[in-house]
Image: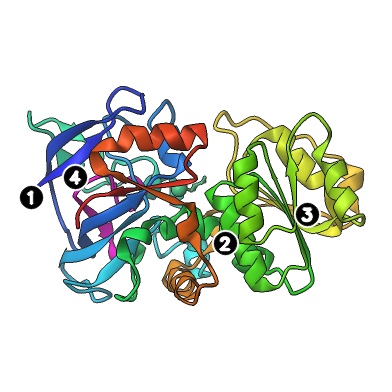
Amino acid sequence: MKIKAAVFRDGTHNPSMEDLDLAGPRAGEVLVKLVATGVCHTDLKSSGPGPVPKPVVLGHEGAGIVEAVGAGVTKVAKGDHVVMTFGFCGHCASCNDAEPAYCHNQGALNFFCSPVEGLRFKDAGGAEVHGDFFSQSSFATHAVGHERNVVKVRKDAPLELLGPLGCGIQTGAGAILNDFKLKPGQTLAVFGVGALGLSAIMAARIAGASRIVAIDRHQHRLDLARELGADETIVAGADPVSAQVLGFVPDGVNFALDTTGVLSVMRQAIDSLAPRGMAGFVTSPWDGSELSVSVRHLLFGRKIRGIIEGNSNPDVFIPMLIDFYMQGRFPFDKLVKFYPFDKIADAFHDSEAGTTVKPILRIAA
Ligand code: CXF
Ligand code: ZN
């Protein structure tokens, strides 16, 4: 079928809006007419050098309406409202253990954009364009996902808002609720309060955290963090942040979440931990550089853990977050600014600059 999509060709944040031919849905797949899609920092990084081949249609926080299903699909039907999430294989050891975010085939299904069945898009000249980014490529009027990474959602929720639950929001909230399993009375420091960090703070409030410390370079984000549940805020600057966190929570925090992937910040998160505390990180330096830690500090039962996609089981966790939102307990709409689809370059710019926490592109009414 003919669709419109944003095609990243030259390593910049400026895609061309193009007419493409889309193949599918194949067996097990779902064709979604997109209503809106979030923009995540992984889209920004993936438009440049790295593992994602070009030209490519990016986008991995799609929300829309099922238009057609391929052979054998039983999970959703035409007309269902869905959120598209990350791809996973469904048959490796992690998937079998219901931890699909750690799928052993994660790279192929999310970043390499070259499915064995062949590329999904052709441009106006008949040349191939990579798709299947995060098993969706949602910067487009239509996207094809596998039924595994398409989550049916309640129809009374505002569909245009829901896409970011597929990645950024579930990553932050899931780190707290699925991975840390923070208990009432425990303490948390969040390093970097963009979409992930703010989602973590809202989730920690739901879980009953006794003290939440937010750290960021931008005062306006810290103001929002306080509004959403942070008790203390720290403007990251010259002084070691860990000393300031210990000023608020002298024993150290039970949990520290780094959302920056900046090694010096990750080290501050680890240095803020109480004995037996856990530091989680949700992204890594794109260049693969390594972290130095004090082994003596870790010896006291402290732990460091990588957390992908909030260790979420999306079919369970995304509807749960929507229920929290509808109950007024998880107001993630406060993070969002909407852009028309053809202003995608502005959305990328504002996300990179930090002036918009979570851009959402409106694609159709
Ligand atoms: C990513 C984050 C880095 C590891 C793979 C998954 N999530 C999406 O943005
Ligand atoms: Zn993402």
The type of residue carrying mark 3 is Lys
User: Which residue lies under the disc numbered 3?
Assistant: 303
Of badges 1 and 4, the one in the foreground is: 1
Image coordinates for residue 17, horizontal then vertical, percent: 19, 34
Residue at mark 1 to residue at mark 4: CA–CA distance: 11 Å
Left or right: 87, with 175 as reference point:
left
Residue 145: within the magenta?
Answer: yes
Q: Is residue 296 above or below residue 163?
A: above
Question: CA separation, marks 1 and 3?
Answer: 50 Å
Q: Which residue is mark 1?
A: 1
Q: Earlier in the sequence, mark 3 or mark 2?
A: 2
> Which numbered dot is residue 173?
2
User: Does dot 4 land on a helix, a strand or a loop?
Assistant: loop
Left/right placement of residue 94 relative to residue 185 reads left
Picture residue at 42% right of the left edge, 25% below the top: 49
Q: Which residue is mark 4?
A: 120
